[in-house]
Image (cartoon, grey):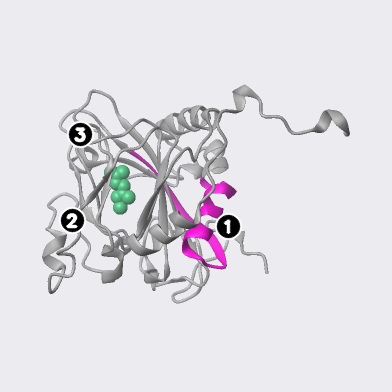
Amino acid sequence: MIGAYHKPRRLHWMGTPAAQITDEQVSFYRENGFVKVENMLTGEELEQLREYLEEAMQEDSGRSVKTDKNGGAYFRVLNQKVNTWRDHGGMGKFSFHEKFAKAALDLTGSNEIRFFHDHGLWKMPGDSKPTPWHQDTPYWPVNEAERGMLSIWIALDDVNEQNGCMAFVPKSHKLGKLTGINFLEPQNIFDYVEGGQLDDQKPVVVPLKAGSCTFHNGLTFHYAHANVTDRPRRALAIIYMPDGITYNGNGHIVTEGSNLKKDQPFKGPLFPLLVKRHA
Ligand code: SIN
Ligand code: NI
């Protein structure tokens, strides 16, 4: 029905509205390479995403990729599933969600935001290992990731230093792409930093409430503590690319079956365009 009855109302079950990205958050992100955004999910969305991601992590159709199995060395760092949306339609709702992509557009100031891939990232209890300090870009088959690729990391549980919240080194995204770290026998990324460039920067630990998130630039150094609690720490990360990022031709699980050619811009059904800036 249209008319007087159609006035928008905030209903209790809809939970709190999602936060808008403020100018302060944009400046903080550009200066420091990461930013925290509270209440990115409504209470209802959080509940739904928990259910979908639980299901997706169990699914075994072979379209998404589990990095390691229970008992493996990588599993102790992360129980990770790449491209959950390919196994679970409900995950698509979140992995392609316009409000996350719109926030990424605002933070980067780019003209477009394209989906790259998602990860379910659970840090399991029991002999849990920290996620070592690393940058994300060295692992991606892209040219010029320096041009602003980024991730949203959404906490599905309250996270703190006990169960593996994230920590970031401010301004480390300004150092460019360094050597990738071996997660199982981690090198010290700070050994690759020349000339004391980060001497003034202390890592910032970012505890989050469930439903809140951080965004981080693919070049920003980040780390997560081991989970010393008795419950999994559940998170969803979605990786985005601004316009014009091209494929570097290297084999990678996320580009398999994509028919992309070396040095061609990312496009096609596995990498949908999510938002565009209005002229
Ligand atoms: C983690 O969830 O522990 C690490 C996430 C990341 O490396 O982006
Ligand atoms: Ni990372």
**Pointer 1: residues within 10 angstroms few (<14), some, or many (20+)?**
few
Answer yes or no: disc 3 within 8 Å of ligand 1: no
Q: Looking at the image, is 24 positioned above or below residue 211?
A: below
Which of marks 1 and 3 precedes in the sequence? 3
Residue 147 in the image: state x and y as whole percent: 42, 71
Mark 2 surroundings: few (<14), some (14-19) or many (≥20) residues within 10 A: few
Q: Is residue 204 magenta?
A: no
Residue at x-position 52% and y-position 49%: 100
Q: Which amino acid is tagged 3?
A: Gly
Residue type pointed to by label 1: Pro
Left or right: residue 270 versus residue 143 is right
Part of the protein shown in magenta: 95-121
Residue 214 in the figure: left or right of residue 242: left
Could you tell which of marks 3 and 2 lies nearer the N-terminus?
3
SS class, disc 2? loop
Residue 269: mark: 1
Where on the picture, by quarter, is residue 176? bottom left
The percent coordinates of residue 161 (x first, y second) are 22, 36
Q: Is residue 74 above or below residue 215?
A: above
Which residue is under mark 2?
182
- Of tags 3 and 2, the one toward the viewer is 2
